[in-house]
Image: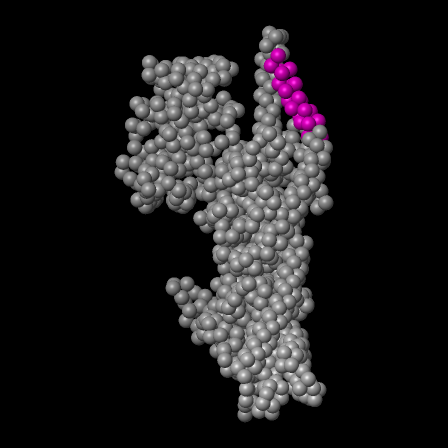
Amino acid sequence: MVMARGQLRIYLGAAPGVGKTYAALEEAHRRASRGTDVVVGFVETHGREHTGAMIGDLEIVPRRTIEYRGASFTEFDLDAVLARAPRVVLVDELAHTNVPGSRFEKRWQDIDVLLDAGIDVLSTVNIQHLESLNDVVTKITGVPQQETVPDEVVRRADQVELVDMTPEALRRRMTHGNVYPPDKIDASLSNYFRVGNLTALRELALLWLADKVDEQLAAYRRDKDISETWEARERVVVALSGGEEGDTLIRRAARIAARSGADLQAVYVAGGDGLNGTGSTRHLARQRLLVESLGGTYHQVVGDDIPQALLDFARGVNATQLVLGASRRGRAAQLFSRGVGVTTTAQSGSIDVHLVTHEKVGRGSRRTGLPGAISRMRMIAGFALTVLGLPALTAIMHPWRDDLSLTTDLLVYLSATLLIALIGGIWPALVASLAGFALLDFYFVQPYNTLTIATREHLFNLLLFVLMAVLVAVIVGISARKTAQAAQARAEAHTLAALAGSVLRGDHPLQALLEQVRETFGLTSVTLLELGPEPGVGPGERRDPNDWRVVACVGEPCTSPGAAETDIPVGDELSLALRGRTLPASDRRIVEAFAVQSAVALRQERLSAQAAAMRPVAAADKMRTALLAAVSHDLRTPLASAKAAVAGLRNTAEMFSPEERAELVVTADESLDRLGRLVANLLDMSRLQAGVLGARPVPIWLEEAVPPALDEIGEPAAGVTIRIADDLPAVSADPGLLERILVNIIGNALRHSPPDRPPLVSASAHAGLVELRVIDHGPGVPEDAQELIFTPFQRLGDQQAGTGVGLGLALSRGLAESMGGTLLPEDTPGGGLTMVLTLPETGE
Amino acid sequence: MTRVLVVDDEPQILRALRINLSAHGYEVAVAADGAAALRSAAASPPDLVILDLGLPDMDGAEVIGGLRGWTDIPILVLSGRAGSPDKVRALDAGADDYVTKPFDIGELLARVRAVTRRRAAAEESPTVQLGDAVVDLSAHTVVRDGEAIRLTKTEWSLLEILLRNPGKLVSQRQLLHDVWGPAYEKETNYLRQYLAQLRRKLEADPSRPRHLLTEPGMGYRFRP
């Protein structure tokens, strides 16, 4: 008898403590109550009361004890469960690594054996243990995961149930002590269990379940502004030829991209002289919209060698897959040269090339032969005219052949041939001239009705006829081609202008425009240079004609037009310097248009910058007035009391008792201290606002920086708890400024903490940033007022005079930002305020 | 009597310091600029110099250099709040410690006592009390709560420099130079690691050190 494999049901959670084990136990009870034979193979309650109680009267298979390196561990006992042979077994923590000496290395392998034995298994796993998400989770949380389980183990499960809980609810559970013992709560909340972390993990869990992780990761990264963390694994480039079939290719490429969670980029290679591209503007414009609507980007590059240009682009963007259309050319054409597809495939190296068939395969593009030459229809008409018209003409002229001189005959035939040349171009005209030669010779040159020519003069006349016919046909052909080329150049320029137009509507038009030039023409750098000093110099000043200044650039900046391969002046003061290759004259025209556009974009940017600069001035003015009023009050008060005390001592010292004298001295000293603090704050604030603070960041380790700050605060800070791991990376900060911030925010926390619950200072590292948290359990600040406390002189609930001047937090935030960090308030779960100081890790 | 030379261009500061120091039993000489300070120190060598970094005629570090050319008397630097680079430069030039203006006179006197005591203590007993640990610098042993504590060679070198200069703020550069060698200037993470190890071995609460103190970005100090 073949035993049916057991069923695996997995409870998937985003983080510890969401209630997976609890849910699994619930299910076990439910099945047991229906009379199923259920046992508990292994449950880890982590000392959580509710979970422990949930086991209730379920039968527990005793754990095995294993001796390892002198310590004893208890471990899930696979053999005991197999021997017991229940219908259903609950085995917690799928990703667990067994103690060495067990039968298998991983618990999921144990479970596999149980399933093979026909036993149903209930198990649990957290999202961070899934192998494919390991990197991502580490980058989000900053905590590397040791225990992982292959995705397919979970995917293979018969049922996966998400045990979901909102981050806020989970944090609430934690503060109530339902997850970890009390002494671990604060630290956990500020490290792993930050709302941001939990939200990210929860999203990951949901996405993974929806089987869409890859696709969404890119979007996630974009939304969270994570620039240098994980890479999307794939990038698909689709090559467009400008034909109709591009739509099919783009859709196909988008499907390939979607499957592997890749970026999609479409590229069109325009001819090297900017003229001979065969693409249709109409198709390209539509395809560009299509690509963008599918979440991809559209690019255009210039290159003579299409396969090479394609591959250069693909390598440049780190493409992993390249999608090409199968050849549009007919079988005959393929005999003479290898198509783009074949050549590209041969040279693609590590990039996978997909050749996609489409409706247009083998039908040829609509324009064949010389690009832009006379159309097929006209050529057919030309041949038709040759075949039908010339005999007809001969028939009409034949009766009068003795009345007409040979000159007239020749001119009539020449006219006919020219007509054919005009209509059908060079090939029909060539045929017509030869046919005309034969007809004239046969019917109109004596002796008649033979191909023999009697006089040399007649032969000469006939040859001249052929020569003239051919020459005219060639001229007609050339002019026709020129006309077509001109039309195409217009179309090309139109495409570029349309692209540029879309670029100009973006946020940084100038930069985007230069990037467009660089990409389109395959340059290494494009620089916009301006002559002379900043605009706004007095009219009397003379400009140094060689004093070029870089206004904007992409790639390596080029500092003077002389140093560029190509430079294109725009007016007297601007010049577009291009490096990478010398542009042919034909491209220059288009680049000139770009250059003019970039000048316009520059002016536009400057105007909008001016407008933006004016806006805060008014606001700052108002703020300054308020500040001045507040400062003059806060400065004058301590000054007055110090002056009063000292003057009293100086003039009438003999009238005071020793106690009174001492009291006056203390008053003066305290007032001067206050004054000193205020002056220092104001100085730093004004330096900060003037941008001359001169922060000099050096590597600083927080566990070394916090104790001196506590010393500076003095006696009151004795109770502050520090919980900073000494393996945290160093932050890049100015030591003096960091101390000001720490003294300020820890001082604040102390002031607002109840005496029995001193503040906690903890720190953790996440994705290149180090977060220091000062957590107090005081009254807290309502969420809508949390930003208000950073406004100067906005002491919240202004009650105690003389406890600092409402400048501290504004200054601290300014100082943090001047060092590339942030200072943000947060609610302490369970009440109170948490200040989060984030500083960048040192680069070294 | 301990002779103190106070150098500052502010007459009010000079006056206040002169009165305070005299009242605490110091013999005080004053100088209003760098040149006068160097002359005065050469004419009658003081036991301690209190030097303002912002002098009208020369840079504070130059004055330190001028003094260090012939004497190793303690130099205590007064500096404005801003500008930790100035302080680091002064320390590297040979200053013993710094006090930030505006300062508490009590704190200044404590620093003065710490750096002058060092000179007295340096030649004396080879054992130093560090919290509840006793360090014997000549026998190279550390005993804490009756138990011998083993230190690595590098830990010893660092600890010895700090203990031989009680109260002095020893700059990061000097520690790196003296322990690792002249090629090391920027490897401040070494210092942090070894000091963390020393604190774990010697301090009662390593996260709140009482004796082996860090001045972030500047240097380390042994506070007896």
Of B165 and B134, the residue lying toward us = B165
Q: Quadrant of residue A164?
A: bottom right
The image quadrant that residue A373 belongs to is bottom right
Question: In the rendered view, does A115 fall on the left or right side of A616?
Answer: left
Residue B213 percent coordinates (x, y) = 44, 37
Give me the residue at 54% from left, 71% from top.
A322
Q: Is residue A291 above or below residue B108?
A: below
Residue A639 is covered by the magenta coloring: yes
Q: Residue at x 57, y 91 (%)?
A: A450
Q: Quadrant of residue A518?
A: bottom right
Q: Would residue B143 be counted in the magenta stretch?
A: no
Q: Nearer the viewer, residue B160 or B6?
A: B6
Is residue A491 toward the left or the right of residue B131 in the image? right
Q: Point out residue A496 in the picture as x, y percentages from the top left corner.
A: 63, 60
What is the chief secondary structure element of the magenta stretch? helix
For the N terminus of chain A, the quadrant is: bottom right
Q: Residue shown at 49%/14% (left/top)?
A: B11
What count of labels does the image hold? 0
Indicate how the structure is coloured in the image.
Answer: one colour
Residue A734 visible within the image: no
Query: Residue B113 location, x and y as percent?
Result: 41, 24
Q: Is residue A605 above or below residue B1?
A: below
In the foreground, B181 or A279: A279
| Residue in the foreground of this view, choosing between A157 and A620 | A620
Residue B42: x and y in percent read 33, 16
Q: Decide if residue B29 is in sight here.
A: yes
The residue segment tinted magenta is A626-647
A74 left or right, relative to A449: left
